[in-house]
Amino acid sequence: MKRVVITGLGAITPIGNSVEEFAEGLRNGRSGSDYITHFDASKFKTTFACEVKNFDGDEIFGRKEARKMDLFSQYGVVAARQAIEDSGLDFTTEDVNRIGVVWGSGIGGLRSLEEQIEINSDYEKNPRYNPFMIPKMIADIVPGQISIEYGLRGINYGTISACASSSHAIINALDNIRIGRADVIVTGGSEAAVTRAGIGGFSGMKALSSRNDDPATASRPFDKDRDGFVLGEGGGALILEEYEHAVNRGARIYAEVLGGAMTADAYHITAPHPDGLGAANVMTYALEDARVSHDAIDYINVHGTSTPLGDVAEIKAIEKVFGEKAYEVHISSTKSMTGHLLGASGAVESIACLVAMDQGFIPPTINHFTDDPEIDDRLKLTFNDPVEAEVNYALCNTFGFGGHNTSLVLKKVTA
């Protein structure tokens, strides 16, 4: 199989609208959670979220074009633009038939769907649906938009698996390059579900934190008093490239994608398996696919959403797979800072792993106040402050409603 490397990155997140800003936010343990500004949330049980700040689609795309795109598409296209620029790829000298886009989103254009339902609430009187409603709403539109903007005629599709969507996209991109279907794939994911329906829906199923008195500390992975996740939004993009192709054009290589795996819990539509069986399987298979021993892993960026059940189940899985090594490897949940970006999580958290490799530090799990007796205190969960450490191998876990599990193995590449 062909080797696959990462040569470009882009990020629009609640703690920074570039990879540089995102990295600075990670190092400083910045919380992206605050009271919702996208709409009046005062009547909801949860009134806060991790919104993207200082992002103006009208300014970036022009008002006419921005009105044709849902916010999740805007985040995705901007992140992809950053990654493509970062990669140094010149598509005028490339075979664009060998360059593709594989993109993940768990929900897609929820804001656009919600707007049209509200506009047409009195359907019998005068239905007026926007002609761009469908292309704004469908979750697979971002790879199409990216391909159109850059004239990329290779593999092109979307992956939809709830919060595992962008990790599935990355693994699909990896496999397509491995077997020779493409030389380069723009991959990642985006989400913009901080809407009335998004907050109302997740709140209704009691998945969200309701710590309205202190939003900045509401995302508390592994803390005894965690009470649910904080909804986030944004996008992350990675350029995956066949190794020889990258070397031949003199590209900067961030890391090699050694392997990945996908499993199912086959247990419940929203709750994880209590013993983390699917999570343990996916980490085991990812390490096998990467041909790497668990002893090699320096850092695990966990799914770690700050839910009572999910955090414990993932820790059980890590202990099962890693044994005594579980107490030596660095572990952290960057969702403590970004909130839960749903379908964009895997992409953004993979970038967090690459930042850790590049800058030599473990991003913290912020907002830890009280130890959970169900979680072994020997684990190196990097509470509250970053830790300087060399990261050569990282594992990135992402799980989704429906029992979807993904895990990626990344290796630092040095010149």
Image (cartoon, helix red, strand yellow):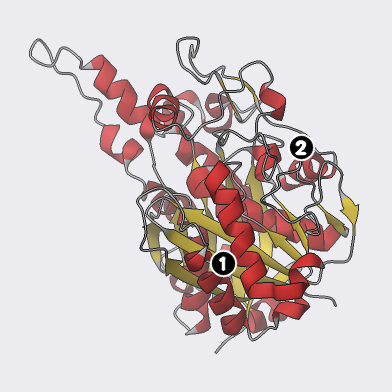
Amino acid identity at mark 1: Ser
Residue 90 seen anywhere in this rendered image of the structure: no
Binning the other alpha carbons within 10 Å of mark 2 as few (below 14), some (14 to 19) or many (20 upward) gives few
Q: Residue at x 42, y 26 (%)?
A: 64
Whether residue 149 appears in this view of the structure is yes
Q: Pick the quarter of the image with the N terminus.
A: bottom right
Of all residues, the one furthest to the right in this rendering is 388
Q: Position of residue 171 (x, y in %)?
A: 51, 69
| N-terminal label among 1 and 2 | 2
Position in image of residue 50 (x %, y %): 61, 30
Give the residue at the far bottom of this rendering: 1
Q: Is the residue 246 above or below the residue 115 in the image?
A: below
Residue located 60% across and 50% down the image: 311
Of residue 247 and residue 75, the one placed in the foreground of this image is 75
| Image: 247 above or below 38 | below
> Where, quadrant-wise, is the C terminus in this rendering?
bottom right
Q: Which label belongs to residue 341?
A: none
Q: Quadrant of residue 361?
A: bottom right
Front-lying residue, 407 or 270: 270
Which residue is found at the position 88% from the left and 66% from the top? 390
Residue 9 in percent (x, y) is at 67, 56
**Where does label 1 land, which residue?**
407
Q: Quadrant of residue 391?
A: bottom right
| Residue type indicated by callout 2 | Thr
Residue positioned most to the left? 124
Mark on residue 370?
A: 2
353 vs 167, left or right, is right
Q: Secondary structure at mark 1?
A: strand
